[in-house]
Amino acid sequence: MTSKSMEVRDGVGLLSMGDTLLVLWAKPASLDRWGFQLNRMEKMVVSRVEGILVLVIIMSVDTPPDVTVRNDMQAAVHRLGPKLRRLVAVPLGHSVWLSIIRTVVRGLLIVSGESKRHRVAASVRDGLIQLCEKASPETPSMGDLLTGIEELSLALGLKASVAA
């Protein structure tokens, strides 16, 4: 079994498993919440020669990230470069929200210059499949990752599983 480390803070849950970081956003993106995620990503890449995988599940929230947060995200994704082997964003929610957030995330990846490496997925399962395309021996199994997502959902007090 892969070693795990979970942290939950103000609507964002992080669970590192091997070379993979699972992120669950239950509140809108802010600089503080993004900084919380980025700090964990930066710590993980230091100890992983082959880089890391990141799956970001974004619950339906009121607002997409503002321009300051988007700019910081773009710069960070660009700066991490190949150390971020693959990042997959999975927005969940109603069709209007999905359209907005998919556009924001795709734009962020294009501007960062990393759109060929990173993805936006239509479902958690699809996101895991895309993430596992870049798996290493340190990457947990899809079953373990699904269990980790369940653990994050519970830790954030979500009523239903986001992995379904």
Image (tube, rainbow, N blue to C red):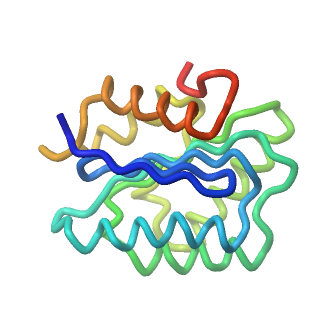
User: In the picture provided, is 39 more to the left or to the right than 8?
Assistant: left
Q: Nearer the viewer, residue 54 or 130?
A: 54
Residue 67 is situated, as x and y percent measured from the top left of the image, at 78, 75
Residue 21 is situated, as x and y percent measured from the top left of the image, at 39, 51
User: In the picture provided, is 152 more to the left or to the right than 19?
Assistant: right
Quadrant assignment for the C terminus? top right
Residue depicted at x 43% and y 58% = 116
Q: Nearer the viewer, residue 11 or 129?
A: 11
Residue 5 is situated, as x and y percent measured from the top left of the image, at 35, 50
Residue depicted at x 34% and y 71% = 43
Hey, which quadrant is residue 143 in on the image?
A: top left
Q: Nearer the viewer, residue 102 or 69?
A: 69
**Position above or below: 123 against 121:** above
User: In the picture provided, is 129 more to the left or to the right than 106?
Assistant: left
Q: Nearer the viewer, residue 48 or 95?
A: 48
Residue depicted at x 80% and y 49% = 100
**Position above or below: 26 against 29:** above
Residue 19 is situated, as x and y percent measured from the top left of the image, at 26, 53
Residue depicted at x 68% and y 51% = 11
Hey, which quadrant is residue 137 in on the image?
A: top left
